[in-house]
Image (tube, grey):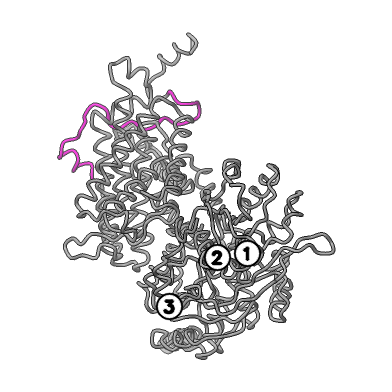
Amino acid sequence: MSAPAWRRAMNTPVGTLTAPGVQAMPFERPGHAPLALGQRLRAIRPRHLIVLAALLIYPWVATPFFTFQIGGQALVLGLIALSLTFLAGYGGMVSLAQMTVAGIAGYCVAIFGDSSVSQISLGWAWPWVLLMAIAVAVLVSAVIGWLSVRTEGIYTIMITLAIGVAFYYLCVQNYTLFNGHAGFHHITTPQVLDVAWRDPVPYYYLALFWAMAGYFLITYLLRAPFGLALQGIRDNARRMNALGFNVTAHRVAAYAVSGLLAGVGGVLLAYYNGLVTPGTVNTGALINILIIAVLGGMRHPIGPFVGAVVFVLMQTFGIDLASQLFGDWARERFNLVIGMVFLLIVLFSPDGLLGWWTQLRARLRPSGGAGRSIPAAAPH
Amino acid sequence: MQSTRRRFGAKVLGAALALAFTAGVQAQETIKIGVLAALEGPFAAGGQDCMRGAELALLQKGGMAGGKKIQFIKGSSDATPDKAVNATRKLVEQDKVQIMIGPLSGDEGIAVKNYSKTQPNITFINGSSGAQATTLMDPSPNFYRFHTEGAQWMVGLGEHALSKGCKKMYLIAEDYGFPYSQVQGFMASYCAKGGKVVGKSWVPLGTKDYSSVIAKIPSNIDALLVVLGGSDAVNFLTQYEQTGGDLPLVGGTITVDQTVLNFKGKRRESLVGTPSAGPMADSLDTPEWKKFVADYKANFKDGFPSPSLFAYLYYVSTRAALEGLDAVKGDLSGNQANYRAALQKLSFKGPAGDVKIDKNRNGIGTTFITEVVKNADGSLANKVIKVIPNITQTLGLSEAEFKKMGLGSRDVPNCP
């Protein structure tokens, strides 16, 4: 870095160090972190209660298909994408290996628990299986982080993509541990409380519980000292280093947290599919997580869930939409329509679907909500 | 005023009733069939031909079966089991299809079979997926496969290779389920009759560089058994030619098909005489096959020069579904019990031999042994040498003997 560039970088206010034209990322309430309970309750707005009520009532009005395949799947994919939003939106590290971490947790469920491949599966009791799956996911994610945090931007993407693709090929070709191309079938949910957890309604609530747990964990962390330091590192790592923060340690810890979310998501995904195969972690699946995160918007932890709902709806009904729009010949070329919808969303709002919400609110309230203390444009 | 309103109300009620009535009648007269194939991913081109095969079966019947109109609802997967089950679940639970045809590839088939157990009121008919385990291990009572699978397609090729003097062979094949089945179909009889496979090279799907494999080929063998498909086959054959290899080859079902025979190179000439086997053959000389090819060409201008294996298998599967409906006159009542009984008894003459199923609901069918010949115009084609009818899934062995051998894998069977 040349001397003038260095001076410029050091004199730029925090949060505006991004490329010209790109809006600065939100910075969670500095100073008063974490919030006291009273403050938290006061922060609850009617729309939060409406969303919560809608989520709880949903399986009672939707068909089992919508409950399981749309609702359940969107919550799980949203949880995995949340791990990426946390890393990318608040840590400034775009990792393509989040689905790999989720897949590893899924493989652990099959390897330590029960599956159709009895010569590999160890058949442990479910608490140990789940503990092991999550622990391995966190560990692997931390190792991926440790390998990639010394890189920036496009190089982080490349290194994590390389790890993801390498793991895919390992799964395809290794028969002693991953059972190769066929993978593991017949992964069943544990017998807990006499509930058939893979039935649509129980599965939906299970996924909802963990999705909300992940969501609140992230919103809490973002206001805790750790999250604030992480956002500082995102905006100016050099300055944070000068202030005495260990940049590498914070980044690796962020990867470990993301591994926890992706791991829980991966276990739920394995239960959702009832199987885990190399197809779960192929390049397409890795990129789908990035699409979900970008589609929803990375400025708020709710983004990946919004993105996941749209993504799952398009994956499921894109084929019908294509033939509705362009006639029956388009049915076999429906990916074109899915791509067009995604393109339109990102074209008109670089912040994804959350950006639309922000624009809408700005238009409805021309004064700009003077009384609000939060500089961030995203809703809380 | 009062009367006008009442009259209007009556009209609305009448219209609603009429609508409900016609809707009810329509629901009775149309049968929805879901068709799932891989329209994305590595098999996208084959997946489109699957759809052509299914459509052709319906076109030949004028869009009707059992006196009812048939409506196809198409779905797509990307050849991964997760996607196949999601797409199938959407067709069954959201679009409410009564009969489900698909999927395309092996592991998808196993996953859809497992899903079919949760939907006992729907009948599932396999599209073209050919994993042995789908119907042999833990079969599902409402999952049918009317065509034969990868191991059955190679039955008889072992004896044919022995009759040509290939007593010691070396195997090169892709490392997944379908080639395992193919190799088992070949080796089961080849080993039993005294042939030796001295070594095996399992290469990952999509391998580009075969130099290390070619270097391992021993010199004291009579022929190579090559079970590769598509670009893998072309890459291997080209590199084998460049390194000066001159051993005769024996091919798997998709190793020397039309897509591979069209490739350019000197090695092309030396492919003449290469035997292979499969459930159909382009040059088949029966009137049923000729009609099938003519109908395919007439209806699909954008299709392949001749129907692919995928089109043929989906055609057979769809036709079985429709013939079954004809047999019960479109009656799917009683959780489709009559329909399933009819499917079990079904037997008809397909484009390439008789179509019928065994007690596990897997196809018993014909295999064609072919050899590559050079046509007058210089193009290469597969000529039928031998026809072997009535091949069962246990490859002619009793069920106990077959279970003892086990399903095909890297090490099963083995005769070095």
Mark 2–mark 1 Cα distance, whole angstroms, equals 8 Å
Q: Secondary structure at mark 1?
A: helix
Residue position marked by numbered label 1 in the rendering: B161
* Residue contact at pointers 1 and 3, CB within 8 angstroms: no
Residue sitting farthest toward the right: B376
Name the spot of residue A100 as percent of width and height, x first: 39, 44
Q: Main secondary structure of the magenta part?
A: loop
Residue B11 on the magenta segment? no
Q: In x, y percent, where is residue A308?
A: 40, 51
Residue under pointer 3: B360
* Distance from the alpha carbon under mark 3 to that under mark 2: 26 Å
Which image quarter holds the C terminus of chain A? top left
For mark 2, does the 10 Å Cα neighbourhood hold few (<14), some (14 to 19), or many (20 or more) residues? many
Q: Which residues are magenta?
A: A17-44
Mark 1: amino acid: Ala
Q: Closer to the N terminus: mark 2 or mark 1?
A: 1
- Asked if the residue at tag 1 contacts the one at tag 2, i.e. Cβ–Cβ closer than 8 Å, the answer is yes
